[in-house]
Image (spheres, rainbow, N blue to C red):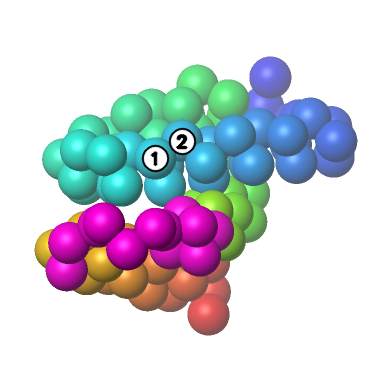
Amino acid sequence: MRFLSISLFQAVSGWIGLTAAGIVSDVGSAELFYINELCRIYGLTDEQRQIAALYCAMHAFSFVGRADGSENEDWRERIRGHVEEWIEEAGG
């Protein structure tokens, strides 16, 4: 499964991005090792991991956009910090 088709890769990247954003949002970064493991299992190349990182950032931005104001500043800082990391990881 080393080389995913384009449409399957897009689905997997979107799913990985949403999962990573959810992990950071709900439990923090300690559990992000699951994302690395998913990337390994799916055989994502370095380039594909960069694209998946962009999906992570996009989904995290989406979480912030849908926030209802009840989130505390720690949550916002945690999300912002990971968005910056994912954008850098994506090559930006």
Residue 77 vertical position relative to residue 43 in the rendered view, above or below:
below
Secondary element at tag 1: helix
Neighbourhood count class around disc 2 (C-alpha, 10 Å): few under 14, some 14–19, many 20 upward: some
Secondary element at tag 2: helix
Q: Between residues 75 and 19, which one lies in front from this camera angle?
A: 75
Q: Which residue is mark 1?
A: 22
Q: Hey, which quadrant is residue 33 in on the image?
A: top left
Q: Give residue 86's position: percent from left, percent from top.
A: 43, 64
| Residue under the image location 21 percent in, 46 percent down | 29
Residue 71 within the magenta-colored segment of the rendering: yes
| Residue under the image location 29 percent in, 47 percent down | 24
> Please, what is the three-letter code of the amino acid marked with disc 2?
Thr
Callout 2 touching callout 1 (CB < 8 Å): yes
Q: Give residue 82's position: percent from left, percent from top.
A: 32, 63
Q: Residue 32 vs residue 8: left or right?
A: left
Residue 34 vertical position relative to residue 91 in the rendered view, above or below:
above
Farthest bottom residue in view:
92
Q: Hey, which quadrant is residue 23 in on the image?
A: top left
Q: Give residue 39's position: percent from left, percent from top.
A: 49, 34
Q: Residue 15 vs residue 67: left or right?
A: right
Q: Which residue is mark 2?
A: 19
Q: CA distance from mark 2 to mark 1?
A: 5 Å
Q: Give residue 38's position: percent from left, percent from top.
A: 46, 27
> Please, what is the three-letter code of the amino acid marked with disc 1?
Gly
Residue 4 within the magenta-colored segment of the rendering: no
| Residue under the image location 85 percent in, 39 percent down | 6
* Badge number at residue 37: none
| Residue under the image location 20 percent in, 38 percent down | 27
Q: What are the residue bounds of the magenta stretch?
A: 62-73
Q: Residue 1 vs residue 79: left or right?
A: right
